[in-house]
Amino acid sequence: MSGQLNIAIVGAGIGGLALAAALATRGHDVRVFDRFDAPAPVGSGLVIQPVGQRVLHKLGIGHAVEELGQKLFRMLGTEAAQDRVVLDVTYDAPALPLFGLAIHRAALFSCLLDAARRAGANLIAGQEVTTAASGYVETAQDRHGPFDLIVDASGAGSVLSPIKARGLGYGALWATVDWPEDTDLPMDELRQRYKQARHMVGVLPIGQMDHQKNTQKAAIFWSLPARDYNVWRARGLAQWKKEAAVLWPDFTPFTSQIEHVDQMTMARYAHGTLLRPYTRDVVFIGDAAHRASPQLGQGANMALLDAWSLAQAVGSANGDMAKAARSYAQARRWHVQAYQAMSKAFTPMYQSNSRILPVLRDRVLAPMAMHPRMRRMLTRLVCGDLLPPAQ
């Protein structure tokens, strides 16, 4: 490595903060630009898979994140009409205590923000980047630079990324609630319930928000066509709770905590991938480089893997940032493309208006998934290392 580099990161999300921590630890001058007056997470719960956990441990915050999150050892989905198991993925691995780590975004964000600050990264809040070119980033307030490297980690709302993502027909309503005392659902499993592919409801235990408030939380979600959000609001909570109780009675202790429609946040999804995640001026990571539905639970993991791979590429490029961008793209290429393709294939089986795909899912794929070899493959798929995360 040829000395200290000046690096700008646009966006203080999961990928941006992970990259800031990794690069600042290596002695670089890192500035993170965020449009909010105070950096803050957006969203509810997520699952950090083993590949993402390894990045967090390399950043020195793996144990801190584990203390806040909830370990998951199984993902179980049942079809409502006949109470048939149609998804059953475990983290079983001989001699390897693998697990998914479910956590609220705010808790993960707090750990990553602390890591970036400890490493010496400089966070510049309230500065929305509008353009980035020739080593400079511009905001409404000022022009910053010059930088040796500019990275766009500003997520699905990026104004810098040339990605052309296609909006998906279905999204989901999300909320964070307390884990109820009157539930028999296990706290170490993600549970989902399906009615064909038109309805999907789930409960994700996500641990606690911080060390001071030792209250166990759950993220709940309800699949919904993106165009129907306003219709759902107009129908009111009573109608929704009644429908949810019929679909899945075990969901009632969670929905009883929802008292206003604004407690449920609508998440809309899109699918798209940059074939080349960099230009002459900017390198793209996370949702600025690739977007998909959360069906495989890989979004946060992809951002973490992108961040770590780019940090490694910068470290071995001897100051040549064009080389670093190419190395990063090559390292992540096949893993990203494979998981994007699988997400695109799996999503309509769980979120669509299709009548045929749910039958294929329940009557063909579910029985096949019970075979030991297929179960091992599904475990690797969920863990995030069915293919090597970096070449």
Image (tube, rainbow, N blue to C red):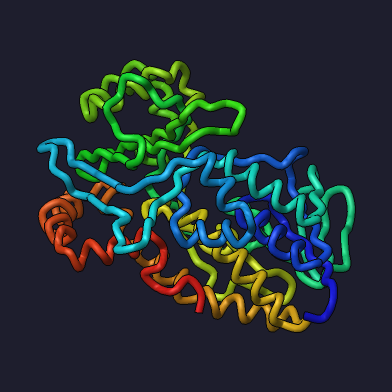
Quadrant for the N terminus, please.
bottom right
Residue 350 rendering spot, x and y as whole percentages: 28, 49
**Residue 56, picture quadrant:** bottom right
Residue 158 seen from this side = no
Residue at 40 percent across and 36 percent down: it is 205
Q: Is residue 9 left or right of residue 372?
A: right
Residue 177 rendering spot, x and y as whole percentages: 45, 26
Residue 214 rendering spot, x and y as whole percentages: 53, 27
Q: Is residue 282 left or right of residue 75?
A: right
Up-down relation of residue 188 to residue 317 (above or below): above
Q: Is residue 89 left or right of residue 121?
A: left
What number of labels is visible? 0
Residue 70 seen from this side = yes
Residue at 33 percent across and 48 percent down: it is 73
Up-down relation of residue 148 to residue 372 (above or below): below
Residue 117 rendering spot, x and y as whole percentages: 76, 50
Residue at 76 percent across and 83 percent down: it is 318
**Residue 251, picture quadrant:** top left
**Residue 342, picture quadrant:** bottom left
Q: Is residue 18 left or right of residue 389?
A: right
Q: Nearer the viewer, residue 264 or 381?
A: 381
Up-down relation of residue 227 to residue 26 (above or below): above
Q: Nearer the viewer, residue 2 or 233?
A: 2
Residue at 65 percent across and 54 percent down: it is 154
